[in-house]
Amino acid sequence: MSAQTEGVLYDVVVRGGRVIDPASGIDAVTDVGLTDGRVAALGSGLRGRTELDAAGCVVAPGFIDLHNHAQDLAGHRLAAMDGVTTALDLESGVAPTGTVYAAAAAEGRPLNYGYSAPWAAARLQVLADVPRDGTIGTMLAHIGDPRWQRPAQPREVQQILDLLQEDLAGGALGIGVIVGYAQTTDPSEYLAVAAVAAEHGVPTYTHARDLIDTSPEVLVDGAEELVRAAGETGAHMHYCHVNSTSFRHVDRVLSLIDRVRGEGSRVTTEAYPYGAGMTGIGAEFLAPERLRARGMTPQSLVYAPTGERIADEARLRELRDKDPGGLVIVHMLDETRPADLQLLLRSLAFTDACIASDAMPLTWQGEPAPDAWPLPPTAFTHPRAAGTFSKAFRLMVTEHAVIDIPEFVRRASCLPAAVVELATKGAVRKGTLAVGTDADIVVFDPAGYRDQATYEACTRPSSGLRHLLVAAAPVVRDGELQLDARPGQPVRGAHC
């Protein structure tokens, strides 16, 4: 205990853990004192009104998920048990963004939350007269609607850009661009969106178009388009789930990103540790003829509302017509095959790649019970909603020793925090345990921190999490979720 901390009584003390903070270079067994929702001190022998035992555990900045669509109580609870303290929906976003922030604040959230300005919702409103109602469900329901996928006229492009700027004014953390769901969009529109982001000094978060390797007819190679936008506009371009959009061509994409970074472009990436994705069954790239180009069949898809593997093309067409927004798990890589596993690991281990979940909302196969905990077996989603960070730890640190624990913490908290800080102009200080920063903290046992969710038991919480604090308030304490905890705060862009 130093002279500065002697006699001080902190609100909370996290005691005796291995404190790892790559942002400040700390890696030592010590205590962390928290007061007024901030980190107040680090040192031995601190005293607190509440003291949490962290012996044998890693104490780290809370994990920041840049890509989480499960923005409700159940989704936040699953993420909390996986070590996440900040869950952001940045790839697609929701709108009107200001209204969505207000609704989340009124309901309360266990975790910090934030959103991007959604290009898809703006396009749906301008081109298909679909109102922006602040839900992901509306977008999913119209995901296969050709009206919003067509090329826009110059006047319409301007209307889309105007809506995006309204959302930026409402606190959006950049612009989410799921151009991979509207492949016939003119490339000039994508450049115009990137230029707006550059003007406001915020990132874009892109679900890229198809690669020319899998879709020779695509207007422009998705990876080339993204890096071109970074070079031409100066925008920070974040490449969402580079593993699932690059398929078996990820090495080429990663090499391209590495090259343009060396030339000075700002391109960041993320990946999740699963060989399967999840999206609406009406997505144009899940049409039977498009599946074949990706080396998949209808049996590669599992339809969430029933849990069925889709038997054939006739059943796939039926479901796409009847329920275009119905979620499906899309099996792309077989993790039991060494070659596929190595491909996945290369995506995760790529230089400065963030870990991000792409968690999807729950589908209820029976009576909905979103407030229940543990979640009943009638709740269905992709296991990444519950186990992304712990599975990344298991694969990359424990089983394959691709990285060490400090590097895992950097990819789970420090690197995504840098993206958030760009959008907030440094007003939000996360991803570090430096004195004065937000007291969002994860405490986990490295020997027991493991994903438990599977495709069959998709909502099983991860193991090995001892404590999770958001703004110094326990959301998980001694391994138990605190059901009444709602300390989450909005993470808003500085341009609002």
Image (cartoon, rainbow, N blue to C red):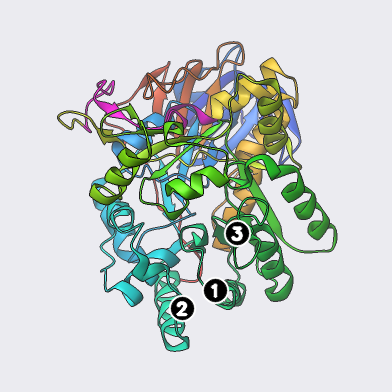
Q: Is residue 293 left or right of residue 305?
A: right
Assess whether mark 2 and mark 1 are in contact (beta carbons under 8 angstroms). yes
| Residue most extreme to the bottom | 155
On whether residue 11 falls in the magenta region, the answer is no
- Which sits in the foreground, 218 or 84? 218
Residue where numbered disc 3 is placed: 426
Q: Give the answer, above or below, for where 315 lies relative to 369.
A: below
Task: Identify the image quadrant of residue 98.
Answer: bottom left
User: From which residue to which does the magenta span run?
Assistant: 370-388
Of badges 3 and 1, the one in the foreground is: 1
Residue at 22% in and 29% down: 365
Assign a secondary structure to mark 3. loop
Of the image marks 2 and 3, the number of the one nearer the N terminus: 2
Residue 120: x and y in percent read 41, 64
Residue at 50% in and 44% down: 291
Q: CA distance from mark 2 to mark 3?
A: 25 Å
Residue where numbered disc 2 is placed: 161
Residue 215: x and y in percent read 60, 55
Q: CA distance from mark 3 to mark 1?
A: 23 Å
Residue where numbered disc 1 is placed: 193
Residue at 56% in and 72% down: 190
Of badges 2 and 3, the one in the foreground is: 2
Assess whether mark 3 and mark 2 are in contact (beta carbons under 8 angstroms). no
- Which sits in the foreground, 34 or 351? 351
Name which residue type carries label 3.
Gly
Q: CA distance from mark 1 to mark 2?
A: 7 Å
